[in-house]
Amino acid sequence: MTGWRAWPRSPALPWLLSLALVLAAALLAGRYAERAALADLRRSASATLALHVAAFRTEMQKQGSLPLALASDPEITAVVGPSPDPALLARVNDRLAEIARASGAAVIYVIRQDGTAVAASNAGEPGSFVGAMYAFRPYFQQALDEGAGRQFALGTVSGRPGLYLSRRVAGPGGRTGVVVVKVEFDGIEAAWRKGSEKGGEAVMVTDPRGIVLVASEPAWRFGTLRPVPEEERRLIRERLEFGDAPLKPLPLHPAGDGTLRRVGNGAEPARLALPLDAAIPGTTWQLHTLTRVGVAVARERIQAQVIAGLAVGLACLGLAEIVGRRRRLRASLAEAAARRTELEERVRARTQALTEANRQLKAEIAERQRAEAERQRLGRELAHAGRLAALGQFAASMAHEINQPLAAIRSYADNAGILIQRERFPEATENLAAVGRLTERIAGLTRQLKGFARKASGRRDPVALAGVVRASLEVVEGRLDGIDLALALPEPSPYVLGDGPRLEQVVVNLVQNALDAVAGVNEPRIAMTVRVMGERAVLEVGDNGGGLPEGGAQVFDAFFTTKASGLGLGLAISRGIVEDYGGTLSAGASPEGGALFRVELPLAPAAAQGADAVPGAAA
Ligand code: ADP
């Protein structure tokens, strides 16, 4: 992975690398193809070489046995004797000519012991060998000494190269001689040349010294494969082996990896050739072929180079595509990961914000609950304080209320005393009865007073609502003079569940407010109604006073008052009491023109209706 990542540092580098790869592949493939083609060429050239060797050998064998056959011929043996018969000579000459024609030998001749040719197949022709001196020829000496000899040389008379095959002849009178068959290779050379000119291989035969004896290229004859030492050259000249041939090295130069030769002498464009050689059996000679490394090999090489270059180039492109794809994939994966991270980050931030909001909400709820609890606690304390304040108020009004009956009791008691002194007993009794009634009334007032000071009891008894109204009116009786009081109290009264004295406190408060409202009004009127509405009992207190002050709803707020000596607690406490018993207290305008307050309370269960459950509170 890291390798791929590190690869494309420079944008040109991959292309340079690819180019280098393509070139290397083309080079290698070209070399391989060339080598394979050369191996093919070598195989076919080896086969051709073997054919050439066989053909050359056949050519040599054809005449090889001739000298042996001729050496035992009686006429030929006769001519090497001293002064042979001219007729015999003529006959032998004719026969030699005939045999030469038939066998394809260039010349056949017979040499006397002293080295002089006595008979020849070309006798009588221009350039006849007869009379020529051959004692210097190695093949002559060889045959005399060893019985047989052979030499390749230029003809001293003809000037034509050829292979001389010699044999010793035992002549009459202990004389010896030598019969020689000269084989020329013109025919085979011509055939080779034709083949070579048609684009085939060049062929040559060399002797053990590397001197070319027979060749498809006439110019190569007597050329050398390797330099000939000076001493050797001298000997060759002395024996007139190759005339005055300069024995120059052949125009062959190593090429390729050394197995090939570049053939050329500067005149024509050099060409590459594959050299092969093989020994010619039965001789010390070598046959060489130089097979042209033609355009076929070059074509194979170029084809291989193009194919390999294309293949590697395509592979590089494919690789580049794969690498590019991987890179794009990696980039898109990284992008997706970045997006995911960003998303996670946003979710995390959002979650944090929500958590914070939630925490704030919880804190707010806790704060509200705490405030609510505080409000309730304050409400309870307010109710209590209200009751205490009302107690003070009532104490003052009670003192006033009690003072009147007390003064009346005193005057009734004084009158009763005077009436008893005057023995007016019936009248005195009546006065004392009035005293009794007045004390009863005072007892009632103090009972109401106790009820105001009591805190919420939580008691719930069936209470007759009309009875509560009557009891309340007794409390304020002293203020009712001159008031047109309209009462609508049903019989039997509906019962509600609650605490009688506390409900009386509510009604007393409502009636006192109504009295306050109608004070100073012409024909002051107050109407009190009790009725049943569905599951509830309703009590209404209406007046024809000035009506509710602006923003009537706030009359229930604690300490809201429009009166100089008011506390603003009465309605707040009253609403609290009513709501304690599951009811409602509301305010509105009355048909009389003033205010109308309405108390609604749930009815007590049907079984309690009509039963005088609380005797003191009953009507
Ligand atoms: P207080 O009587 O001490 O003022 P309340 O809570 O009983 O306290 O009454 C609050 C206020 O409601 C009064 O000051 C008065 O302005 C108004 N109010 C109560 N009853 C009536 C009514 N019947 N007509 C007009 N205004 C009323």
Image (spheres, rainbow, N blue to C red):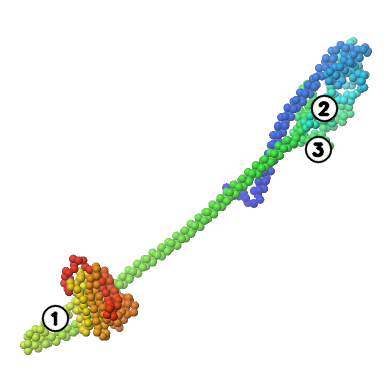
Depicted 32 relative to depicted 463: above or below: above
Residue under the image location 52 percent in, 54 percent down: 337
3 or 2: tag closer to the N-terminus: 2
- Seen from the viewer's position, the closer of residues 117 and 434 is 434
Residue under the image location 87 percent in, 13 percent down: 76
Give the numbered dot on residue 437.
Answer: 1
Q: Which residue is mark 3?
A: 269
Residue under the image location 14 percent in, 81 percent down: 437
The C terminus appears in which quarter of the rendering? bottom left
Mark 2 element type: helix
Specify whether 129 is left or right of 55.
right
Between the residue at mark 1 and the residue at mark 3, the CA separation in whole angstroms equals: 170 Å
Are the two marked residues, 2 and 1, in contact with CB atoms closer than 8 angstroms? no
Mark 2 is on which residue type? Ala
Residue under the image location 82 percent in, 19 percent down: 63
Are the two marked residues, 1 and 3, in contact with CB atoms closer than 8 angstroms? no
Q: Disc 3 vs disc 2: which is toward the camera?
A: 2
- Seen from the viewer's position, the closer of residues 109 and 359 is 109
Q: Which residue is mark 2?
A: 190
Query: x and y percent of residue 31 in the render?
Result: 70, 38
Query: x and y percent of residue 167 in the render?
Result: 84, 17
